[in-house]
Image (cartoon, grey):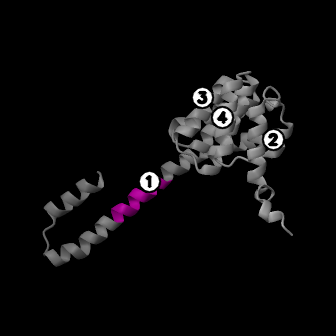
Amino acid sequence: MCREDFVTFTLKTADMKKSSFLRYGFFFVSFFQLQYSIAQTNIANLQNADTQLADSFYSLGQWKAAIPAYEVALKKDVSNSLAWNRLGYSYHNTGEYAKAISAYQKSLGNQPFPQLKTVVQSRMSRSYALMQKKNESLIWLDSATKNGYANLKEMDSLRDYDFIRNESDFKAFYNRAYNIAYPCMSDPRARQF
């Protein structure tokens, strides 16, 4: 019985004075809300258990085990942008770049928080670079750096970027990331000591 039906049933069947009903009716409605909240929490915990298992595989770098675990978890919660990102990264690490990109797009479609968004965009760039799709890779790296991505270590050393590292656009995005990471270096007034 949903909450509205319960309240309607209580209103129709209550054979008490209005003041009594308000006193007891509030108790019944509050009790029902509590039961409803507990049920929702139990459902969330079941969903979290699947995600926690997938996260365990992910944390251990067991990409092949993480993939089916995330797929199960995401059937129950399709709006989990972090889980979509991690599924994409698991695909990325098994060399399935097209599937990684698809998962990353679903992550972005679920409005991830800003820090996650830049990570997903940079990973999209890396996957496209590994597929040797230069334009797509540079477009996503541009988006990532515009949104605050500043992982210079990744940009310097990951083999994922080897295909685009010598491009002038890559160098411009690297400089943008450098200025994000070290804002005082881009402001001449900050060096007037």
Is residue 71 shown to the viewer in this render? no
Amino acid, disc 2: Glu
Q: Earlier in the sequence, mark 2 or mark 1?
A: 1
Find disc 3 in the rendering and name its residue: 102
Tag 1, which secondary structure? helix
Q: Earlier in the sequence, mark 4 or mark 2?
A: 4
Front of the two marks 3 and 4: 4
CA separation, marks 2 and 1? 44 Å
Tag 4, which secondary structure? helix
Q: Residue at x 16, y 66 (%)?
A: 14
Indicate the quadrant where residue 159 lies: top right
Front of the two marks 1 and 3: 3
Disc on res. 39: 1
Find disc 2 in the rendering and name its residue: 154
Front of the two marks 2 and 1: 2
Extreme-top residue of the structure: 132
